[in-house]
Image (cartoon, rainbow, N blue to C red):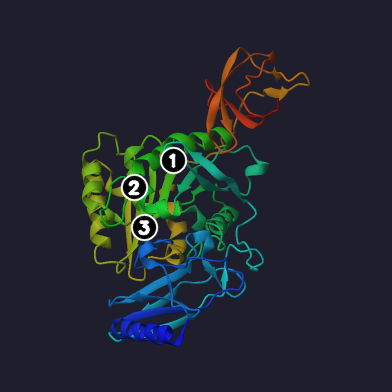
Amino acid sequence: MNMKNVTFLFTLLFAWVGTAQVTLRITSIPANTPANTTIYLAGSINNWNPMSAQYIMQSDGLGAWQIVIPEGTGTVEYKFTRGSWPTVEGNASGGFLPNRSFAFTGNPQTINLTIQSWEDIAGSGGNSTAAANVQILSQNFFMPQLNRSRKIWLYLPPDYQTTTKTYPVLYMQDGQNLFDNLTSFSGEWQIDETLNTLHAQGNYGAIVVGIENGGAERLNEYSPWNNPQYGGGQGDLYMQFVGETLKPFIDANFRTKPQPQYNALIGSSMGAFISTYGGVKYPNLFSKIGIFSPAFWFSLTNMSSYITSSTNDLTDLRMYFVAGQNESSTMVNNSNTIKNNFLAEGVAASNILTKYDSYGTHTESYWRGEFSAAYLWLFQNEILTNTNFEGQEIIVFQNNRGEIAVDGLSEESNFLVYSIIGQQVGELQLNNGTNAIPFDFQSGLYLLKSASNPSQKPIKIYIQH
């Protein structure tokens, strides 16, 4: 770059900064940053979108990256990403970095910043904070309603492997923020630590299924209705996935209590929005709803109309609303509007708890502190007994002639066949003895679930052609 161009560039920069409220300027990035990386700002000013095209850091041609934030009021929290939450910036050792922030002052500001690491790049030094009884159920669980896949987390109670108990299940949104600082974008909820502590104190225990959000698809999937400014519109398909694909898979493969009174939908912000919708759509599947700092502003009129026009029986729903009084000017009023809609539909006042805190903030740290009380209240009226999981012992394997050998069936039975990522791929009619393997099944591991006996344990079988 010649001197004339540099001078012209600096002239433009100084003119730009002089009229801007806040200029964020990254002066250094990690040496192992991939070439030609696009760096995004994600924060409270763009609904924490990790890859918003309007918030791309622009190179100044001199080795720095910057963005100008127009004049505003209050405090802005933010982080930098490479386009997704798994690629968020980290601290000096590659671990979790708390939110950055700045406050508008009414005067131009230039803030120089350094990105110390990226959480996803190997060798960063970060350590997982997930407990030993947390696992990844699938990196790519197929969502047939949306024709895409999603990472699913699974928490099993401490006594899951040593008892035959069946358990309630919590289906929680934004799964990457529940158990592990390494994957969270603003600190984890510590669901595993909280439930492990409660279990040690005598709590019965619960299974938790954490469904990661879709990053750029999060707002689309977390609202059935479109917001002209932010998107949405795929929420009904998303809830069909949770209710009609994921829950049946969990019930088929783990020792659950499948009845609605033992199943909860829980989420925060837009996750609370879609959890509320799911409770109205599927009260026959989920009767417990945990609603943390709900973003009802996203489509308040549509949500209200959906509740009041529902033909489903909502009277058994039990809901816990929790939010900060000062999170936004509409948070408490909108939450009360939705609460009143449920009351009008016959939900008993004793089945709705609202907790509005003066100290509440729109953060994972606030929701982490409120989770235990919400969980205990939602299930406090349920009698959780040590119901044993019983199922007929059936042996299924592939013999050395390439057939499926079966023992333990009382009669010819139809089995639904699932891939290990939860996608139903076919059906099999099996008899005791040997059965031919259809050649439309590829080699691999499958789960067989009895089509006529939901309590039957799922059967694993490896098929090799």
Residue 216 location (% of width, % of height): 42, 54
Kind of residue at disc 2: Thr
Say left or right for 347 vs 459: left
| Callout 2 secondary element | helix
Residue 135 location (% of width, % of height): 61, 49
Identity of the residue drawn at 32% across and 81% down: 16
Kind of residue at disc 1: Val
Question: Is 260 in front, or is 232?
Answer: 232
Identity of the residue drawn at 63% across and 51% down: 133
Q: Is residue 350 visible?
A: yes
Identity of the residue drawn at 24% across and 52% down: 300
Residue 242's mark?
A: 1
Question: Is 150 in front, or is 313?
Answer: 150
| Callout 1 secondary element | helix
Identity of the residue drawn at 36% across and 57% down: 269
Question: Is 459 in front, or is 101?
Answer: 101
Q: Which residue is mark 2?
A: 276
Q: Mark 3 vs mark 1: which is more N-terminal? A: 1
Q: Mark 3 vs mark 2: which is more N-terminal? A: 3
State the image quarter where residue 460 is shown.
top right
